[in-house]
Image (spheres, helix red, strand yellow):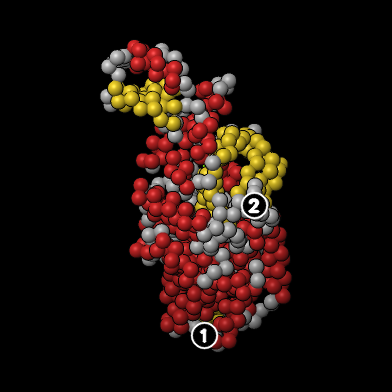
């Protein structure tokens, strides 16, 4: 497959994935309405408070933003892979000689673009409520960090989708996502969580991602969080490779 | 296999799913421009053979080659147009999007989809999502996706399921046209008589073995069976006692009698019933020939264990036609 054809096929795959997202209302509900809705709600309630020197509304772009991009990255590609497998669509693509990596890559890319959309909506909402006190440059850094941070979640999502059927994939990924969100302080600021939970949080990649996002808005350590996320990504890549090798398509 | 290089060759193919033997030493060849119909009862191994041919399964023994190379290689598969028995599309896409997608994935321009959509009568449905298509319409979309890449070999696993009479006739016409343009075709079907009109060769598979591989006419003439149709006063049980009678089927006022020796039968029949009229003697059709082959293969085995055997009543076909 030459480079030109690869690019064109990737384009078709990506377009199909984006169509699947836009035309599937349930995915829109869980992946946009819920995170953005929560964000708006908490912003209205506590947006004008100040925590650790930054406005709560601004901090929420990092924490709820983490929740938003993680939801998309963890659910969308995996459920898509499982559905395509159940339908025999992935088989069909294999017959038409589309490298499976291109199909999976398009799913990951579509989820990433979707994540950008979620972050944009949150940013616009926060600005509209007057709770956004950060430079555009800082916001861009937050967005970049959060989007890069979705990589391990996308990998795990795809791994689950390659291994399980659609319903099991949905259940498993949600079961993974919910405790991560609660325990990492994505909904309720970490300092308000009980001591035990705060201890657990230190071992969760979502905590490190949210903290890394917050550090872009104020001050705080960066290295530890980056290391934790890199380790997670390595582990997730290992799991994804295993799942890919043993996948039945 | 003739002098030209074969499009498809399979040699000594064996495949088993756990304990179930699906293919038990199959040889098959398809030449350029040749249309081969793969026939056989449910569970005969047709889909398994097709799946191996398109590189989705790896032979446990034997080899498959498409245009001389391994179908598990992506470059080889790009020369194929495939319609699988179980089809599935994402419900979020439209007919047009699916067929243009197939064109681009096959290395062609999206515009290549237009003529194929027209050819298959899908032009009016092009904006419709596949979720909102009928079964036969979906089947046609799959066919369009297989045809759009202008493959060297079309591999179609029961493409006529769910098609109405007009669509089916249309389908065989499309196959005939493609064959004339040099496209080779391997098609599995339960519509034996219809396939006979288009197929250059018929391969009968049963329990993973090739029972026959010959042009349809030859298969029919090879079968000594004849059908004798008469209007007679003799009742069914009396007819069944006559020499050389295989089976008797009442048909309105007439009786259809299967026999291997029509001359012996007629001598006795004319003697017994002086009022006999409307006499007709015909060759058995291809369907009879295939049935006879698979029935013969069943002989000596437990008749109740032949899950999915065609059965003499042709119910298999009836189910297909109404499906
Ligand atoms: N995935 C599978 N796992 C286990 N056994 C299988 C599997 N697929 C097919 N078989 C078995 O292999 C044999 C051949 O099946 P195959 O699907 O090739 O038959 P077929 O000729 O296509 O039948 P049909 O006319 O019903 O489509 C059957 O006995 C079937 O039960
Ligand atoms: Mg089959």
Question: What residue is shown with label 2?
Answer: B6
- Give the quarter of the image for residue B140: bottom left
Task: Report the side of A121 relative to A162 (left or right).
Answer: left
Specify whether residue B85 is in view: yes
Q: Is mark 1 within 8 Å of ligand 1?
A: no
Give the vertical position of B58 relative to A10 (above or below). Answer: above
Q: Is ligand 1 less than 8 Å from the beta carbon at label 2?
A: no
Quarter holding the N terminus of chain A is bottom right
Query: Residue at 40% of width from left, 56% of height from top?
Result: B131
Question: Which is more toward the observer, A201 or A163?
Answer: A163
Comparing B115 with A164, the one in front is B115
- Across and down, in percent, residue A23 comes to 42, 65
Query: x and y percent of residue A45 in the render?
Result: 43, 73
Q: Disc 2 on helix, strand or loop?
A: loop
Q: Where A121 falls versus A86 (above or below)?
A: below
Residue assigned mark 1: A133
- Across and down, in percent, residue B210 comes to 60, 36
């Amino acid at each position: 497959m030459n480079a030109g054809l690869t690019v064109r096929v990737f384009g078709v795959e990506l377009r199909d994935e984006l169509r699947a997202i836009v035309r599937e209302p349930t995915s829109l509900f869980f992946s946009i309405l819920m995170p953005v809705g929560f964000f708006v709600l908490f912003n209205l309630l506590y947006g004008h408070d100040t925590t650790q020197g930054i406005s709560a509304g601004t901090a929420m772009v990092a924490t709820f933003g983490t929740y938003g991009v993680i939801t998309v990255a963890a659910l969308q590609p995996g459920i898509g892979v499982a559905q395509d497998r159940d339908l025999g669509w992935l088989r069909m693509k294999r017959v038409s000689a589309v490298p499976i990596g291109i199909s999976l890559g398009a799913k990951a890319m579509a989820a990433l673009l979707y994540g950008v959309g979620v972050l944009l909506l949150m940013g616009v909402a926060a600005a509209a409520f007057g709770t956004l006190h950060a430079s555009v440059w800082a916001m861009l850094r937050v967005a970049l960090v959060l989007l890069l941070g979705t990589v391990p979640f996308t990998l795990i999502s795809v791994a689950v989708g390659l291994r399980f059927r659609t319903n099991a994939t949905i259940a498993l990924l949600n079961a993974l996502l919910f405790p991560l969100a609660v325990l990492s302080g994505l909904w309720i600021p970490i300092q308000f969580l009980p001591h035990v939970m705060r201890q657990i949080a230190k071992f969760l990649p979502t905590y490190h991602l949210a903290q890394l996002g917050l550090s872009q808005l104020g001050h705080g350590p960066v290295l530890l969080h980056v290391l934790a996320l890199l380790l997670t990504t390595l582990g997730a890549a290992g799991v994804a490779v295993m799942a890919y090798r043993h996948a039945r398509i | 296999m003739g002098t030209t290089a074969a499009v498809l060759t399979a040699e000594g193919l064996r495949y088993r799913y756990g304990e179930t033997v699906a293919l038990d030493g199959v040889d098959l060849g398809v030449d350029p421009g040749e249309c081969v119909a793969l026939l056989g009862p449910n569970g005969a191994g047709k889909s398994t053979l097709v799946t191996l041919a398109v590189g989705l399964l790896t032979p446990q023994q034997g080899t498959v080659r498409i245009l001389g190379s391994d179908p598990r290689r992506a470059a080889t598969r790009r020369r194929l147009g495939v319609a699988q028995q179980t089809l599935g599309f994402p419900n979020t896409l439209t007919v047009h999007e699916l067929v243009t997608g197939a064109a681009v994935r096959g290395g062609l321009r999206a515009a290549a989809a237009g003529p194929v959509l027209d050819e298959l009568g899908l032009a009016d449905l092009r904006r419709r999502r596949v979720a909102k298509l009928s079964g036969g319409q979906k089947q046609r979309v799959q066919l369009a996706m297989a045809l759009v890449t202008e493959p060297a070999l079309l591999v179609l696993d029961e493409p006529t399921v769910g098609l109405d009479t007009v669509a089916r006739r249309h389908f065989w016409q499309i196959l005939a046209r493609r064959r004339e343009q040099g496209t080779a075709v391997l098609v599995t079907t339960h519509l034996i008589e219809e396939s006979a009109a288009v197929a250059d060769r018929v391969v009968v598979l049963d329990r993973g073995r090739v029972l026959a591989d010959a042009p349809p006419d030859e298969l029919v003439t090879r079968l000594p069976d004849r059908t004798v149709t008469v209007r007679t006063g003799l009742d069914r049980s009396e007819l069944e006692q006559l020499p050389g009678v295989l089976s008797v089927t009442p048909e309105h006022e007439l009786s259809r009698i299967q026999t291997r020796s029509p001359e012996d039968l007629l001598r006795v029949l004319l003697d017994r019933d002086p009022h006999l009229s409307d006499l007709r003697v015909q060759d058995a059709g291809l369907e009879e020939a295939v049935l006879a082959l698979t029935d013969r293969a069943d002989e000596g085995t437990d008749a109740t264990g032949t899950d999915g055997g065609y059965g003499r009543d042709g119910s298999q076909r009836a189910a297909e036609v109404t499906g």
